[in-house]
Image (cartoon, helix red, strand yellow):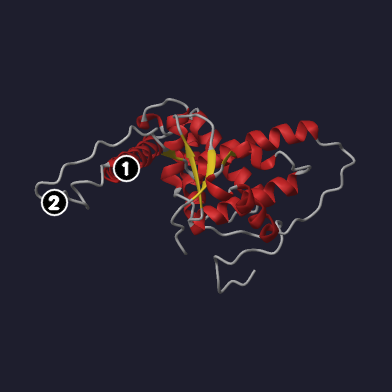
Amino acid sequence: MNDSNPNQMPVEAGRWFRLPVFEGPLDLLLHLIKKNELDPQEVTASIVTEQYLEYLELLDSLNLDVAGEYLVMAATLLLIKSFALLPYQGAADEEEAEELKRELIDRLLEYQRYREAAFKLAERPMLGRDVFVAPGEKLEPQAEQVPIYDVSIFDLVEALRGVLARLTEQTPRELKLRDIPVAQCIPVILARLEQGARIEFISLFEDARDRPAVVAFFLALLELIRRGQVRAFQEAAFGPIWLSRRADPVNV
């Protein structure tokens, strides 16, 4: 891949793939805290650290380029955990561990406040903020809409983990692995989403016979999401992930 263009599509699934669709490490921590029904104060819990490292390992196995800030956060979590596991600690070590933990919790809580405020702003009705009713004009009642929840990259990775787990159980040992061009998967996905159709995330991989096929289609999906051509969403918290074409794609 040409380093001068970090958003260039790779030719093969085996090359590194860089996407600005990624949130940062604080988003991943919030995702894990929500998933495990923990309080942000418990960000340094062992289960959060373990699952954080599992995510990084999976992203690495998908050849997704993980930014250095993710690795710095992993090192911070491991350092705090190592202090907690040490049987004999000096006062300086305990103070350093507590300081690291306090700083991380403060950063997470502040980020969570800004993130929730941004979501609330985005969810406010357009009428009265960007569009106003003319004097004397009556506001037509709007039909009740099903709530839509946009999913994060981590929700997609979590769903992909399940796809890969089922594929491992079904794949014959003698099946030869192969490289699949990611660019070839994009028109296939778009064709399945034509004319306002929507499909469930897991059905995108129903014809995939091996891991390279799953990875190629997943990378193609991330690229389409980055371009603003495809939307991934849920109609209920922790519900199935759906994919649909955007009516107004954003060119990136």
Image quadrant where residue 38 sits: top left
Q: Position of residue 28 (x, y in %)?
A: 46, 42
Q: Amino acid at mark 2?
A: Ala
- Taking the spot 34% from the left edge, 38% from the top edge, the residue there is 105
Q: Is residue 172 visible?
A: yes
Looking at the rendered structure, which numbered label has been put on residue 134? 2
Q: Position of residue 90 (x, y in %)?
A: 41, 35
- Taking the spot 22% from the left edge, 46% from the top edge, the residue there is 127
Q: Position of residue 75 (x, y in %)?
A: 50, 46
- Describe the element under mark 1 as helix, strand or loop: helix
Looking at the rendered structure, which numbered label has been put on residue 111? none
Task: In this rendered view, identify the residue nearer to me: 61 or 202.
Answer: 202
Image quadrant where residue 114 sits: top left
> Does residue 77 appear to the left or right of 179 in the view shown?
left
> Does residue 86 appear to the left or right of 164 in the view shown?
left
Looking at the rendered structure, which numbered label has been put on residue 119? 1
Task: In this rendered view, identify the residue nearer to me: 64 or 109.
Answer: 64
Image quadrant where residue 169 sits: top right
Q: Amino acid at mark 1?
A: Phe
Query: Which quadrant holds the N terminus?
Result: bottom right
Above or below, 97 relative to 19: above
Q: Position of residue 129 (x, y in %)?
A: 20, 49
Q: Is residue 86 visible?
A: no
Cα separation, mark 2 vs mark 1, equals 28 Å
